[in-house]
Amino acid sequence: MNRTVCIFKNLFDIECAGCGGTRMVLSILKLDFYQAFRYNPYVFSLLVVGCIYGIYVIIMKCLKKKIFVPNMKWLYLFIFTTVLFMVLRNLPGFEFLLPTKV
């Protein structure tokens, strides 16, 4: 039996929204962004958005302008999209959202 540290995978035999995340990070460290995206497209996309926001904050601080700070609506959107991604990647027809097999 292949045991992982993922609670969802061990208890329910489903892929959670973070499954493939470690392999994604390792691929990013190797600068293999295509494979990183294939391991976990959701978290990879969140990293890209986070980097863009980080650059935005740095630029706004340098220009001494007001910085947009996400409110609770953004947190709810994040939770909703995370749950949606997890549900979709476990439905038939959405296998392309699963981490690629090594």
Image (spheres, grey):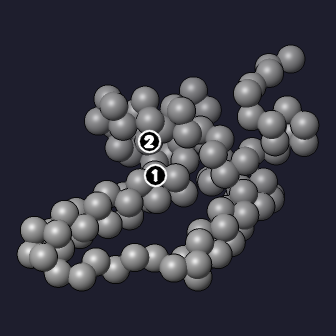
The answer to whether residue 53 is above or below residue 44 is below
The answer to whether residue 20 is above or below residue 60 is above
Query: Is residue 93 something one can see in this rendering?
Result: no
Report the Cα–Cα distance between label 1 and label 2: 7 Å
96 or 26: which is nearer to us?
A: 26
Where residue 4 appears, x then y in whole percent? 74, 25
Residue highlighted by disc 2: 36
Where is residue 53, by image quadrant?
bottom left
Which residue does the image show at 57% across and 27% down from the upper left?
102
Where is residue 58, by image quadrant?
bottom left
Where is residue 36, by image quadrant?
top left
Where residue 11 appears, x then y in whole percent? 90, 37
The answer to whether residue 15 is above or below residue 70 is above
Q: Which mark is residue 44?
A: 1
Amino acid type, callout 2: Ala
Could you say whether the residue bearing mark 1 is in a helix, strand or loop?
helix
57 or 100: which is nearer to us?
A: 57
Classify residue 97 as left or right of residue 33.
right
Classify residue 77 as left or right of residue 10.
left
Q: Residue furthest right?
A: 11
